[in-house]
Amino acid sequence: MLLQSTGESAEAVRIALETIFTPTNLLFIVLATLLGLIAGIFPGLGGPVAMSLLIPITFQLDKNVAIMILVANLGGTAFGGSITAILLNTPGDAPNAATLLDGYPLTRQGRAGEAIGASALSSAAGALLGVALFLVTIPFIRQLAVAFHSVDIFWLALLGLATIAVVTRGSVIGDLIAGAFGLMLAFHGLNTVTGTARYTFDTDYLLSGFPLVPLIIGLFAISEMIKLMGENSSIASDVEVSGGVLKGAKEVVRNWSVFLRSSAIGWLVGIVPGAGGTVANFLAYLQAQHTDEDPDSFGTGNIKGVIASEAANDAKDGGAMIPTLGLGIPGSASTAVLLGAFIIHGITPGPLLFRENLQIVFIVIFALVIANLLTSTVGLISAKYLVRITSVSVTVIAPIVIVVAMYGAFVVRGQMLDVALTAGFGLIGLMMVKFDLSRVALIIALVLGPIAEDNFHRALQISSGDVGVLYARPLSLILISLIVLMLLLPVYRSVRSSGA
C-alpha cells in the first residue's frame, strides 16, 4: 500500500487538528470520553454498548466529527472497567478480568489508591505507546494485518489455553478442571463456521452460547459479595488514602520493563482480528508473572499484575486499528461497532481509507490519545474519593453492588434469563472459592475456546480437510513451540522445588 506524499499527509494532519481543536468539538470529546468512562465502570455496558448508543446521535454530524466522538468514547471505556475490578472484584468488561487478580487483593489490603494510580498511568501510557506503534507501522499496515492466518489464530488461542496450567495459583489439576468446565460452557450454541448447533437443549437462549459478561459478573461480583456478607466486615479495614495514588503511579515508572513488555504484547495481540483485549490481558499478566523474581506473589496483591494487564488492555487499541482501518477487519467487538459507524457515514475502511480519507486516520489517533489522557487524569484525581467505598460496611455496599451487577447483566441483552444465569454462577463462584478452584481458568477457557474452535474449522475448510495446514506455517511452528514450553513450566517448577 502506497502512502500519500508528504504534502497530502500534512494536509490530512491539518484537517484532523482543525476538527478536534475547536471549543465545540473538544467539548464533544470530553463528554464522549466521560460517557465511555462511566460505561466502562458500569458492569455489563463496556465499549460496544456505549458506542452503539452514541451512533444515532452522530447521524446528523459531519463524518470527521462523528468518528472523533466515537473513538473518544472507545478510548474512555478501557480504564473505567479497571476501577470496579480493583475496588469490587467486578471487571467492568471482559478485558479487565485479569486486573482483578492483583487489584482486588491490593484493595483488601487497604491499597486501592495505589492500584488505581498504577492502573491510571499504565493505561494512559500503554494507549500512547500503542498509538505510537500504529503510526510507525502505517507504511507496512497491510502486511502486518494479514500476517496471521486462521491456523495461526488457532494456535494463538491454544497458547492462551495453555496458560491455565501456569497463570493461576494453587493446584494445577484444580486449574485444569476449572478450565475444562469453561471449555464445556464454551462449546454450547451455534458454531459460526459449520452452522451446527450444539447442546442448546432445544432453547433459543443457548443458540449464541453462554453470555460472557453475565457469567463474569456472577462468578466474581456476586460470589464476592456473598462471601463478604458472611464475614460481616468491610472490603478493606485500613484504607491508605494519602499518597497511595502517587505511589501507584511511581510503581509504573519503577517497573518500566514490565510496562513495556506488556504494552508490546497488548499491541501485537490487538493486530490479530478477533483475539481481543481479554487475550491480551491474560497473556501480558502471564509474562509479568513468569519473568518476576517472586511469581508466587501474583494473585496476592502484586502491583506488577495491575500494571501488566492494564498496559496491555489499552495498548491493544492501537494494534486493533491496523486490521480495522487497514483492511476493514474488526480487531475487537468495539472496533466492529466502529466499522459499522464508518459504513453509516459513507467511509470505506481498508486501503482506500489511507488514500481518500487520510484525515480520518489522524482523527482516530488524536482522539484516542486525548481520551486516554483525560480518563487517566480523572482516575488519578478521583481515586482518593473512590477508595473510601472500600471502608463502608459490607451490609451497606453488598446490596447496592448486587443490584447494580444484576442490572448490568440484564442491560447487555435485555433478557431476564441472563439475570438468572448471573445469580446461578454467583453460587458456582462461591463453591469454586470454597474448593480452591480457579475462576480465572474458567474464564480463560470460555473466552478462548470458541476462538480456537472457529479458526480450527476455518483452517480445515481452506485446506480442504488437510490437517497438515496446522503445522505448515513458520508462525504456527513458533506458537506450537511456545505452547510446549508453557506446558513444561509446571514440570520445571516441580523439579526445581523438589531439588531445593
Image (cartoon, helix red, strand yellow):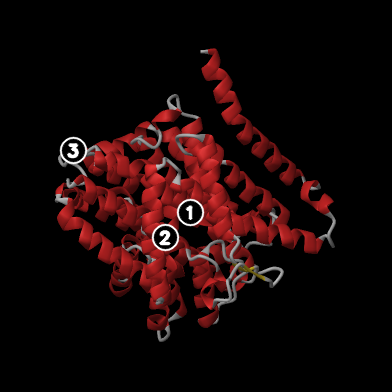
Q: Assess whether mark 3 and mark 1 are in contact (beta carbons under 8 angstroms).
A: no
In the depicted structure, whether residue 297 falls above or below residue 402: above
Q: CA distance from mark 1 to mark 3?
A: 30 Å
Cα distance, mark 2 to mark 3?
29 Å
Element type at marker 2?
Answer: helix
| Quadrant of residue 31 within the rendered picture | bottom left
The spot of residue 370 in percent (x, y) is 36, 59
Which residue type does callout 2 highlight?
Leu
Left of 478 or right of it: where is 132?
Answer: left
Q: Is residue 66 left or right of residue 444?
A: left
- Furthest toward the top, the residue is 500
Which disc number belongs to residue 383?
none
Mark positioned earlier in the residue sequence (1 or 3):
1
Give the quarter of the image for residue 309.
Answer: top left
C-beta proximity under 8 Å, tags 2 and 1: yes
Q: Residue at x 60, y 61 (%)?
A: 187
The amino acid pointed to by label 1 is: Val
Q: Which residue is mark 1?
A: 131
Question: Which amino acid type is shown beneath numbered disc 3?
Answer: Gly
Earlier residue among tags 2 and 3: 3
Tell which residue pokes out farthest to the bottom in this image. 60
Residue drawn where x is 47% and y is 62% of the image: 212
Q: Does residue 344 appear in this view?
A: yes
Name which residue lies at 41% across and 42% down. 435
Residue identifier under label 3: 243
Is tag 2's residue or tag 1's residue first in the polypeptide sequence?
1
Position of residue 166 measured from the top left corner of the image (x, y, whole percent): 53, 36
- Describe residue 9's horizontal placement relative to residue 406 as left or right: right
Mark 2, residue position: 368
| Residue 378 vs residue 383, the one in the foreground | 383
